[in-house]
Image (cartoon, helix red, strand yellow):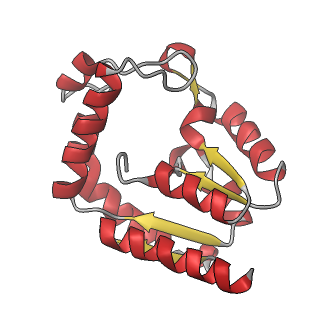
Amino acid sequence: TSSTGKSTLAEHLATLIDGAYIELDALFWLPGWQESTAEDFQTKVRAATTASPRWAVSGNYFSKGIPEITWAEGDTIIWIDLPFRTLFPRLLRRTYRRWRDNELLWGTNRENVWEHFKLWSNDSLPGYVIRNHRRGRRRQAERFADPRWSHLQRHHLQSPAEVTQFLDQVERERATNA
């Protein structure tokens, strides 16, 4: 879900493996917060994953069929599964920082903090996380255990400390194999 550190981890891993960093949000969102069609989005993801022999992807977009591309072609899946009490404050801080700094996101998009206060709105990311965190974790656990993905190494990281330990392990393995 949002604000777990997916992008930060994927970007770091891409550097460690000398691969491309693929941020799915950047491929999905068009200017003015318009969504790509599933077909256009899948085409962009296929192009990004075939452009480099190694890559790290941030995001999943199950409803758009992206794991059928990324999970099918990948060798490792990392699930950052933070508790709500850790995740939600991170989300609020990040949203506020992006709004305060008028940060340019994908295309011409910027945070509209006022939309996020409308917790019942589909445009409210905090509202989405509140409504879907528990259910999303259950769905992700089912996906993670799905035998279709048995070829993937799986890492289920449940705290920021576990994410740090995982990165340290990857760095040690890379140094040993270099």
Q: Nearer the viewer, residue 48 or 131?
A: 48
Rendered residue at 76%/44% (across/down): 48
Pinpoint residue 15: horizontal percent, then vertical percent: 65, 58
On screen, residue 169 versus residue 94, left or right, reads: right
**Taking 139 as reference, is 106 above or below it?**
above
Rendered residue at 70%/55% (across/down): 69
Q: Work out whether residue 118 can be spotted.
A: no
Q: Looking at the figure, which quarter contains the C terminus? A: bottom right
Pinpoint residue 14: horizontal percent, then vertical percent: 65, 57
Residue 82 placement: quadrant: bottom left
Q: Nearer the viewer, residue 74 or 99?
A: 99
Q: Work out whether residue 153 can be spotted.
A: yes
**Taking 145 as reference, is 85 above or below it?**
above
Specify the farthest residue to the bottom.
176
Pinpoint residue 2: horizontal percent, then vertical percent: 37, 45
Rendered residue at 61%/27% (across/down): 36
Pinpoint residue 112: horizontal percent, then vertical percent: 32, 17
On screen, residue 98 versus residue 28, left or right, reads: left
How many labels, in total?
0
On screen, residue 136 versus residue 39, left or right, reads: left
Rendered residue at 70%/35% (across/down): 39
**Taking 155 as reference, is 51 above or below it?**
above
